[in-house]
Amino acid sequence: MQFGIIIFPIAIYQMITFGRAYTQLPLRTFVMGLYGGGAAVLSQMMPVHILSQAENFQCVPVILSILYGKRKAGFLAVGILSLYQFTALPLTSAIPAVIAILVYSAIPMAICEQFERDQRKQRFLVSIALTVITLVVELMFLLVYLFIVYGINGLSRLAAYGDFLAIACVIQLVLMSTVFFLLEHLIENAQVRRRYQSLIDYNPVGICAFNVHNQVVGANAAFETITGYKERELVGKSRLELWFEEDYNLAGKILYDLYRGEIKKNFETAIKHKDGHKVEIRATMVPMVEGNKVRGYFSMITDIADEKMAEAVLRESEKLSAIGQLAAGVAHEIRNPLTSIKGFVHLLAQKAGDEDKSYYDIVKSELSRIEGIVSEMLVLAKPQAISYKPVSIQNKVQEVVNLLSAQANMQNVSITVDSDEGASTYGAPICGASQDGVPGARELFPMGDGNQLKQVFLNLAKNAIEAMPTGGSLSIRIQHLVDKVTVTFTDTGEGMPPDHLVKLGQPFYTTKMDGTGLGLVVSKRIISNHSGRIDFQSTPGQGTVVAVTLPAVSAVGSMEHSHLRDSLYSSQGSVPLEPSALQLPVVMNEETIPRVSISAATTPVVPNAASEPMARQESAVEDSNGFNLMASR
């Protein structure tokens, strides 16, 4: 009965709290205190008989409740047991009994805080030592009692209890050891479970568990992040709901190997995100083996989108490096003889008759085209030194508009320039500027090479005009946004489908019959060198929007010296900055890693002055050509 009274509550508590960390058990202190006091009272109420002598082992649950429930549990257990003494025993017997309880509980009270921090072996030795001490205390109180009642004959009567006391000591040691190992097993199971659970919960690798029916039974936070599902949404789902139909055969083969006990390591595939898009992953799948049978499996996945992007960047770098080497050879081997050929063709054209002049004009035109290709390749062949000066974007845009006005008129294309303060058509001063070309105080100034930026704007504007062979309109909008300047080119041309858009910026890719495929590559390099970015958006049949964003410094209104203001807008368009005049912020270029994004917008997005141009959408997919591209279908 004593075994049942002391052990049964611990066994029940162990089953109820299975898998919980011991330090997080519900009402741990209260439960352990109630167990200690209650089990001790029941032990005293239902004693065990040894050699016809009644005995109880109330000290065992009291000591253990103090050691594992700390002092608050000890106070509760001792209080319950002491209260029972006064209700069940005469006062003359209750007082010594309570004193005995306080004495044998004093040492556990003193060491209980340290007890949990000790190793398991030390805890066991402490428990046994406390049992022995308790037995000694009980013997001392028994000896005092016999001496008071029987006087000097009490010692002889104590000897008569020798066999009884020996058996009682052994039983108490066994009880203490049994309950100790039950509690330790409870703690150890919880700790092991929590260690493994922490390994899963806080692992940066996405981990998901499947049962024998190929259904999800659990997933960690990293898996939720990769798939977009919450764990509660995943539980019960079939594994095939996360695969694309074209990969079902691969999924079946992997499953077959798993149930043969094989581990599938580091294979690359794609799974379906909650919103339907494809997520490229590297996965390892491990069978869950119980009793030599596969009862399920674990899937561990890593999102490799960034890795794929880095690989694409590396390939692009290698490609551009090869182009650079080729360009150097072309410049050396072709440019010099090309100059001679052009000279002789010019001489022959002067001597040719009217019938042949048209042919010579074609030859000269094609030679000029070859020379242009060589020049563009030279830009890629070697780094371009940038002389960092404040550049008036409004002036550069106006220069580009003036250069292209004739071509625009020939193709029936109207050009409108719209700044933060108003709009103008080509040929008129840009709004926000005075007639002498000095912009208003709102203008910000990118630091860089004015001629290179002009080359970019010229290339983009020319592409827009050529995209409207039957006429249309080109809108150029200049925005000054706190610490950046954005120039947006919006045309009403034919637009581009997504499969063309993602190829923009690839060397030698062009949609024009006479294009070289290098213009955007050069533009990308120039903007990247200026710590900026180029964003594209296009809708077939509706046109294309191109936005160039550059970091900029503060407005001219902050300059203290009028001579600097005057020289800033000289014919060259830029002067070196003095430290006291303008401050250049450090801008981290997020486009150092080239990328492309494609989103499913329905109409071109034209940015306003209060927002980023063509802000990236969450569903964007990024590429390696240095542009942020958004294709509308």
Image: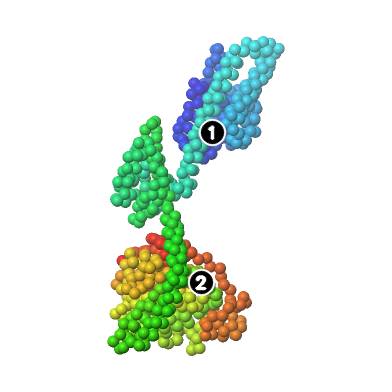
Residue 159 in view, yes or no: yes
Q: Give the residue furthest to the right.
A: 152
- Measured as percent of width and height from the top left, residue 82 is found at 59, 29
Of helix, strand and loop, which one carries label 2?
A: loop
Residue 32 has which mark? 1
Depth check: give the residue in front, 163 or 258: 258
Q: Earlier in the sequence, mark 1 or mark 2?
A: 1
Q: For the residue carrying disc 1, how many other residues have a C-alpha within 10 Å: few (<14), some (14-19), or many (20+)?
A: many
- Residue drawn at the location 36% of the way across and 44% of the way down: 216
Q: Does 1 appear above or below 220?
A: above
- Residue drawn at the location 47% of the way across and 37% of the way down: 19
Depth check: give the residue in front, 605 or 83: 605
- Residue drawn at the location 36% of the way across and 68% of the way down: 509
- Measured as percent of width and height from the top left, residue 498 is found at 33, 65
Q: Quadrant of residue 457?
A: bottom left
- Residue drawn at the location 40% of the way across and 37% of the way down: 288
Depth check: give the residue in front, 418 or 233: 418
**As shown in the figure, which amino acid type bears the numbered disc 1?**
Met
Of helix, strand and loop, which one carries label 1?
A: helix
Q: Does 208 appear above or below 114?
A: below
- Measured as percent of width and height from the top left, residue 116 is found at 59, 35
User: Can you identify the residue that label 2 sits on?
Assistant: 384
Q: Quadrant of residue 348?
A: bottom left
**As shown in the figure, which amino acid type bears the numbered disc 2?**
Gln
- Measured as percent of width and height from the top left, residue 618 is found at 40, 61
User: Position of 412 compared to 11: left or right?
Assistant: left
Residue 156 has which mark? none
